[in-house]
Amino acid sequence: EAGVAQSPRYKIIEKRQSVAFWCNPISGHATLYWYQQILGQGPKLLIQFQNNGVVDDSQLPKDRFSAERLKGVDSTLKIQPAKLEDSAVYLCASRLPGGGRQETQYFGPGTRLLVL
Amino acid sequence: AQSVTQPDIHITVSEGASLELRCNYSYGATPYLFWYVQSPGQGLQLLLKYFSGDTLVQGIKGFEAEFKRSQSSFNLRKPSVHWSDAAEYFCAVTSGAGSYQLTFGKGTKLSVIP
């Protein structure tokens, strides 16, 4: 079974530029998460989707970050304009919608962003 | 709100030695606990998880973890470390019913000396 796919793997931009990340979850996984992992820290949830609806975006800095999952499959996370402190690895994860709390989240390889 | 503490930022062990990585959690209800491993440039891979039953959980790659409710701990162990185990290890706990979000600790980086 194919895993969670993310692209690009690496991105270098200057501050105030915009950037977008793409995620394709495991087939059949209706729940999708975006996490931000700053160097030296654990991943922090940014946004959670169930199909094409937002379940929780309380930790998403909405003045500069946006995310969508229009058809309930692929998702895009955008930053506009980027700040130096946005330098991090952006991880996408997916899971089956049922199964309770023990259901595993599967993670993609991440996109490493460097803002100069 | 739930939280996870991993007291050790960096641990170095010799190949063949035993390993224990510490994890303490704070959660109001019965916790569901996970250990993930992250190799350089890679995403997170699940090692094992606990949600009920036997408090000693077996995982992949020879890892095990023990849930101790009285100590609010979920420590990860391996009897004999291999050089390929060098990576960063994250403990996580789920949130309440419905959203099943993971709250992670800050991670422990493991270095293995040949």
Image (cartoon, coloured by chain):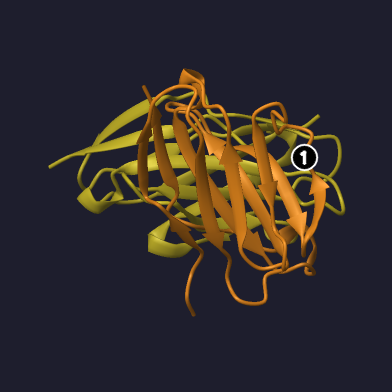
Chain colours: A orange, B yellow
Query: As rendered, which of B15 and A64 lies closer to the eye?
Result: A64
Which quarter of the image is occupied by the C terminus of chain A?
top left
Chain of residue at mark 1: A
Left or right side of A106 for B89: left
User: Which residue appears at 87% of the width and 52% of the height?
Assistant: B97
Residue at the farthest front position: A17
Left or right side of B14 for B69: right
User: Which residue appears at 78% of the width and 69% of the height?
Assistant: A99
Amino acid bearing label 1: Asp
Residue A100 position (above or below residue B96): below
User: Which residue appears at 46% of the width and 32% of the height?
Assistant: A88
Q: Position of residue B99 (x, y in %)?
A: 81, 51
- For label 1, the residue is A57
Residue A67 in view: yes
Residue B103 in view: no
Q: Secondary structure at mark 1?
A: loop
Residue B14 position (above or below residue A71): above
Residue at the farthest bottom position: A1
User: Which residue appears at 51% of the width and 34% of the height?
Assistant: A18
> Residue A65 appears in which quarter of the rendering?
top right
